[in-house]
Amino acid sequence: MSRRARVLPGLSLSLGVTVLYLSLVVLLPLSALFLKTAELGWERFFGVITSGWVAAAVRFTLGASLVAALLNVVVGLLIAWVLGRYTFPFARVIDAVIDLPFALPTAVAGIALSTLYAESGLLGGWLSNLGFRYPWPAWRGFADGGGWREWPIEWTVYDRISLAPLGVVIAMAFVGLPFVVRTVQPVIEDLSRDVEEAAATLGAGRFQIFRAVVLPELAPALLTGFALALARGLGEYGSVIFISGNRPDTEIASQVIIKMIEVNETGTYADATAVAVLLLAASFALLLAINLLQRAAARAHAGRAAG
């Protein structure tokens, strides 16, 4: 019997190329990062990542990324539903615009957003004239002698978007939205409407159909989109730097890394790698948690389907 011709090379060559490429692009850079961080020692490493400057930037980055990712889940689901379920004029144009953050340089996005939401900008000036205000939490720690009785979070009220936390959230939401839409939209397009119509025939309302029929099918895709948007927000720099400015209350972790490298007084290259390792560990932990939730949701959905 003659061997069947294959389009791609055999396992050995394909696996070798795969391992080589992943090693050069992923494993070696990460290994170099950890080796450079190891030069600090544990005491210096923990001293860097727990310093007030770094801790404040990491907390703000995590908080802003989380808010942006949650916002993208809600808005991204709506957009994906409209594009996947309805036919209307200019649908292809809107569908193409969704991918714009993928192709647009992040610096261009940052300049555009800062121009739009600045106090002298089109939307920023209009909202300022309307007296727009919003609160943002900040960690202040526990007061001496207060213990757990003192609330460690204080709220600051901002009257602007640019050079403020909301501007950072908008920038992160801008770059993260396509991840949610492109993850959820194919699932919506493949959903069968027969079960929805059957549930409606049995007297279920729209909210009941969405909660009991549609949402379980979309949950894994929503979690995936949320994780991707959150991870993108954690590592975003170009689109955020212009709208956040060089302010202590809007400084993200990526800015801290850049400052540590460029300004000798604020740290060293090894200190910067310590912050990078912290972000890498946070991203990995979040992605791992989301993957575990996805598997649990898939198992629960399979159990309901089998029952």
Image: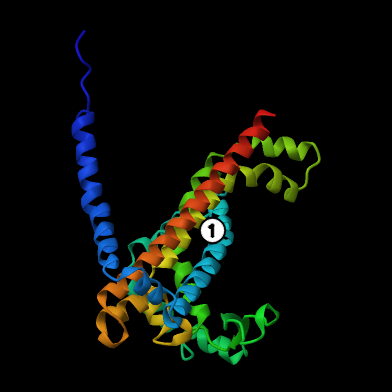
Is residue 191 shown left or right of residue 171?
right
Secondary structure category for the residue under label 1:
helix
**x, y (%) of residue 114?**
42, 82
Q: Answer few, some or many: residues within 10 Å of disc 1's Cα (few below 14, many 20 plus, some between 14 and 19).
A: many
Name the residue at the top extreme: 1
Tell me where residue 141 sits by quadrant.
Answer: bottom right
**Residue under the point 22% across and 25% down:** 6
Foreground of the two, 66 or 105: 66
**x, y (%) of residue 239?**
38, 74
**Residue under the point 39% across and 69% down:** 236
Figure check: 114 above or below 203: below
Figure check: 66 above or below 284: below
Figure check: 169 above or below 202: below
The residue pinned by badge 1 equals 76
* Camera sees residue 237: no
**Residue under the point 78% across and 43% down:** 204
